[in-house]
Image: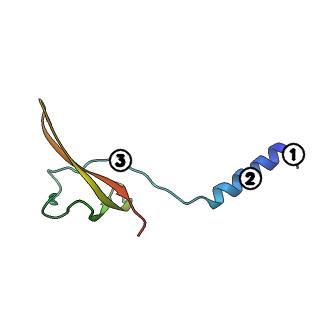
């Protein structure tokens, strides 16, 4: 077996053993979401994220960021996906 073929075979084996991952980034549209921090969820809670294309993940709320500048106030949670 040539070096290239051996590397190809090792790469295919590694890919077959790898876990499938899905990543997405976004924000909560406060105009569309009825869920409110401090009322519906808190730090440490596990929530379900649903993306525009039906992608779903479970995530833990790890922090809640509040900021204000000349464009106005902003607040959003930081989420880390979890395997449950």
The residue labelled by disc 2 is 10
- Measured as percent of width and height from the top left, residue 55 is found at 38, 59
> In terms of sequence position, does the residue under pointer 3 or pointer 1 come before the other?
1
> In terms of sequence position, does the residue under pointer 2 or pointer 1 come before the other?
1
Residue at screen point 87% across, 45% down: 2
> In terms of sequence position, does the residue under pointer 3 or pointer 2 come before the other?
2
Neighbourhood count class around disc 2 (C-alpha, 10 Å): few under 14, some 14–19, many 20 upward: few
**Could you tell me if the residues under marks 3 and 1 are in contact, i.e. CB atoms within 8 Å?**
no
Residue at screen point 40% across, 62% down: 82
Which quadrant of the rendered structure holds the C terminus?
bottom left
Above or below 67: residue 52: below
- Left or right of 64? Residue 68 is left
Residue at screen point 37% across, 62% down: 56
User: Which numbered marker is on residue 45?
Assistant: none
- Left or right of 1? Residue 67 is left
The residue labelled by disc 1 is 2
Mark 2, secondary structure of its residue: helix
């Amino acid at each position: 077996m040539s070096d290239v073929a051996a590397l190809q075979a090792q790469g295919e084996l590694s890919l077959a053993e790898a876990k499938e991952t899905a990543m997405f980034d976004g924000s909560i549209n406060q105009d569309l979401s009825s869920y409110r921090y401090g009322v519906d969820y808190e730090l440490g809670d596990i929530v379900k994220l649903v993306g525009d294309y039906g992608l779903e993940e479970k995530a833990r709320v790890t922090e809640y960021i509040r900021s204000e500048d000349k464009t106005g106030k902003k607040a959003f949670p930081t989420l880390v996906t979890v395997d449950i």
